[in-house]
Amino acid sequence: MSPSLLARRPSVLAPIVAQHRTFMRGGLSRCVTRQQVVLYPRSTIFAAVSQVDAYQDFLPWCVASRILDRNPGSYRETPDSAESLEAEVLHTEIEVGYNLLRSKFSSTVTVVHQGEKWRVDAISAPNEYLENLSFSWLFSEIGARSTRLDLELNFTLRSAEHCLMWDFAQDSIMSEYLACFQRRCAELKSSPAAQLQPQTVGRPGS
């Protein structure tokens, strides 16, 4: 999120005092879907999303991003699907923070780009703020220079206060994050070789 936007919403990032309340479980769960056309080739936006270790360079609040290991794997649309696609499975760790607030997200990321099936899926382990978190990016080629993104985000927060914070700021947060990925595309477009570089495991000194 941009500094000017954060300045307009100081209460959104204020520390929350833990309060014990009883809510229906469904009341703490959220599902967000976005569909957007970006004016970049599919390979470029796919590289921006799948290069997880570069997130710290362009995403707001991301103070560290690491790929701990990578392995070949497979992907099925559903558990019963007969078609199995080749995939790369990454184990990642992302640290986000603002002022004194810090949190780490350990995730399993499945990267698929086979034929017309290009997608990135992630499932994160629970942490102090989230009971569960998963997201998926689907990349559909519209033409040589444009791509349709379908993004789905599912999560369950541990605190009703954090749900209120999210509901208040979600449109601004989602819009800003998508804008950051598009700005990253502009950087990759100016350096085509960066799109093809394999992601490194960790970072120097990590």
Image: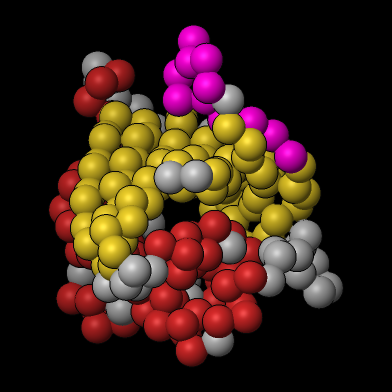
The residue at the far bottom in this view is 190
The front one of 166 and 88 is: 88
The front one of 111 and 85 is: 85
Residue 141 sits inside the magenta stretch: no
Residue drawn 58% across and 41% down? Answer: 110
Q: Is residue 24 above or below residue 173?
A: above
Residue 73 sits inside the magenta stretch: yes
The picture places residue 59, in percent across and down from the top left corner, at 45, 70
Residue drawn 31% across and 78% down? Answer: 2
Residue drawn 29% across and 29% down? Answer: 29
The picture places residue 44, in percent across and down from the top left corner, at 46, 69
Q: Is residue 6 visible?
A: no
Query: What colouring style does the render use?
Result: secondary structure
Which residue range is magenta in the image? 72-83
Where the N terminus falls, by quadrant? Answer: bottom left
Q: Is residue 52 visible?
A: yes
Left or right, 73 with reference to 26: right
Where the C terminus falls, by quadrant? Answer: bottom right
